């Protein structure tokens, strides 16, 4: 499948009047076609089933380079799959996208693809740690969004606990960053962790909560019945 073929399929599902609403909501200056997310899911599912890994990487690269909003979302969705073998080229492509993140929707879709590749090979956390030192806010944020799977294990193995603590260390380094998106990412990570590891979440907030913005502390503690040193969650 060529880029022109893929774009033609995307444009066949444009909804009149939707592009303007989406561009305003997502604060996009790039071209927005006006395609609902479920349509992107259906199209990319079909592409994943019909294309080889090599073909998917090539098409994802081309879609991303088109710099069309929905095409970038489709590029990420095309690579969001747990089992991809071989996946080195997929991981390399995703890493190349990270410095170009400039909005939450595109970043979050790409980070979902990154999550699958990190779970497939946790040694890649070494590369992600370098993101935490970037001057690019969206790259720093991606380090937490891409590692959300480490909040979700109910019975983590010792190695997974070490990885969880490693990522919490990155989050601790972010708490003095006043950027709203960084604070939100820290709160998101902690909020999800609290569902599976409330003790670690409480310990983090007891130690670092005072340095977080109030909204982030409150969101991080949303599912905790009681967290010393933080705002209490609303009923």
Image (spheres, rainbow, N blue to C red):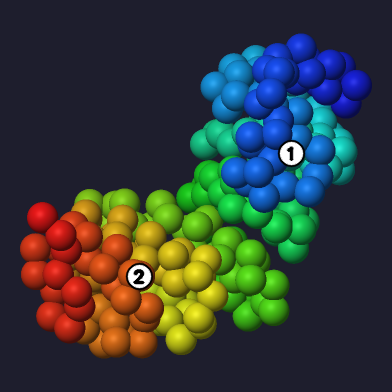
**From the viewer's perspective, is residue 15 above or below residue 166?**
above
Q: Secondary structure at mark 1?
A: helix
Q: Quadrant of residue 18?
A: top right
Please provide percent x and percent y for residue 75: 72, 36
The residue positioned 54% from the left and 75% from the top of the image is 179
Residue at the spot of label 1: 69
Residue 41 pos. (x, y %): 58, 23
Q: Label 2 belongs to which residue?
A: 216
> Residue at position x 90%, y 21% from top?
4
Report the front residue among 183 and 144. Answer: 183
Rate crowding at label 1 as few (under 14), some (14 to 19) or many (20 or more) other CA atoms within 10 Å. many
Name above or below for residue 125 compared with residue 9. Answer: below
Q: Quadrant of residue 183?
A: bottom left
Query: Distance of mark 2 from mark 1, alpha carbons?
Result: 29 Å
* Front in this rendered view, residue 60 or 12: 12
Whether residue 213 is visible, yes or no, is yes
> Which x, y percent locates residue 213?
37, 78
In the image, taking residue 131 as reference, residue 217 lies left or right, namely: left
Is 130 positioned to the left or the right of 51 in the image?
Answer: left
Going 64% across and 65% down the picture, which residue do you hit? Answer: 138
The quadrant holding residue 193 is bottom left
């Amino acid at each position: 499948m060529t880029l022109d073929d893929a774009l033609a399929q995307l444009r066949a599902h444009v909804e009149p009047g939707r592009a303007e609403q989406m561009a305003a909501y997502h604060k996009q200056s790039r071209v927005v076609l006006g395609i609902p997310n479920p349509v992107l899911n259906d199209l990319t599912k079909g592409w994943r089933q019909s294309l080889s890994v090599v073909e998917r990487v090539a098409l994802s690269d081309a879609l991303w380079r088109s710099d069309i909003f929905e095409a970038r979302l489709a590029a990420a969705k095309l690579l969001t799959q747990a089992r991809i073998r071989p996946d080195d080229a997929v991981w390399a492509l995703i890493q190349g996208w990270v410095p170009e993140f400039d909005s939450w929707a595109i970043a979050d879709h790409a980070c979902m693809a990154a999550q699958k590749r990190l779970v497939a090979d946790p040694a890649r956390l070494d590369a992600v740690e370098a993101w935490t030192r970037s001057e690019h806010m969206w790259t720093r944020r991606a380090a937490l969004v891409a590692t959300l799977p480490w909040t979700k294990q109910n019975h983590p193995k010792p190695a997974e606990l070490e990885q969880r603590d490693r990522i919490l260390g990155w989050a601790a380094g972010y708490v003095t960053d006043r950027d709203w998106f960084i604070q939100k990412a820290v709160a998101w990570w902690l909020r999800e962790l609290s569902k599976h590891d409330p003790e670690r979440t409480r310990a983090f907030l007891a130690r670092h909560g005072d340095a977080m913005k109030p909204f982030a502390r409150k969101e991080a503690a949303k599912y905790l019945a009681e967290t010393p040193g933080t705002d209490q969650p609303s009923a």
